[in-house]
Image (cartoon, rainbow, N blue to C red):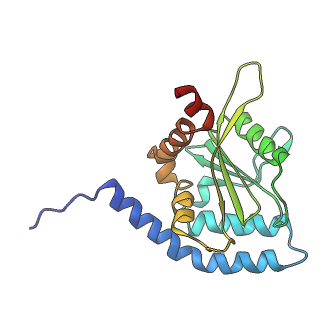
Amino acid sequence: KEPRLRRTRTQIRKEHTARIKKSFRPFHNRLTEVVAQESSSEEEVRRWCIDVLRHVLGYEDVELDTEMKALNQRIDIALKKEDKVFLVVEIKNARSKLPANVRDQAVMYALNKSADWAVITNGQIWKLYRVFPVKGSDPTAVEVFDLALLDDDGLSDDDVDKFYLLTSRAIFGGETERSFHRIACLSNRRVLQAI
C-alpha cells in the first residue's frame, strides 16, 4: 500500500477555486438574464444568491437562514454554524449602486447577531466587510473585497479567489481573516504611520 501524500493548503485552495469556477458558469448566465430584465426584483436576486451559496460555495440548507430578524427587520440571508450567525448578507436589486447606507444596514445586522462578517450584493457586485463593535460608538467595517461578476473579464481568477473567501472552509480555516489582516496592514493609513 502506497503512502497517501498530504495535500498542501495551496493545493486544497486550488481545487476549491477550480470547483467554484466550474460550478459558477450556469449561475453567471442566469445572473446576466436577471440583470437584463427591466423588472428584475430584489427577490429574484435573493433566490439567485441562495442558489450560489448552496451550489457554488457549498453551504447546506441548515446553514442558511432566510427568516431571521434583526432590529425589527428581516435579514436577507444569515449564514450560521451550530446556530451562531457568522455572516450576514444584505441583498438589493440588480440596479442598486449599493450606497453606504446599505453597508451600514448590513453592518448593524451583523453587529446585532454578533457576526464578524457582512456582505452586501446586488448579484453582480459583492462586497465583504469585517465588522468590529466599538464600545460607545458606531461599529467599524473594513472592506475586505469588492468584486464585479459582470465586468469585462467575466469571472476572473481574482474574482474566484475573492469568492472563495466566502466559503465556510476559508472563513473557519482563517484564510478570510488573513486576507482581512493583509488589507488592513497595507491600508494607506497604516503605511503612512509606518513611514
Q: Residue at x 53, y 56 (%)?
A: 167
Q: Is residue 59 above or below residue 155?
A: above
User: Residue at horizontal 77%, vertical 45%?
Assistant: 103
Residue 122 on image: x %, y %: 77, 62
- Using the image as rendered, state which of residue 57 and residue 68 is in the foreground: 57
> Residue 36, how many percent across, how many down?
82, 79
Q: Quadrant of residue 129?
A: top right
Q: Residue furthest left?
A: 1
Q: Is residue 191 left or right of 105 when viewed as pictured? A: left
Q: Quadrant of the N terminus?
A: bottom left
Residue drawn at x 90%, y 75% as measured from the top left? 39
Answer yes or no: is residue 69 visible. Answer: no
- Is residue 44 among the parts visible in the rendering? yes
User: As displayed, is residue 11 above or below residue 141?
Assistant: below
Residue 109 in picture, x, y percent from top left: 76, 40
Which corner quadrant of the image does residue 91 belong to? bottom right
> Left or right: 92 with respect to 151?
right
Q: Nearer the viewer, residue 148 or 50?
A: 148
Q: Residue furthest front?
A: 195
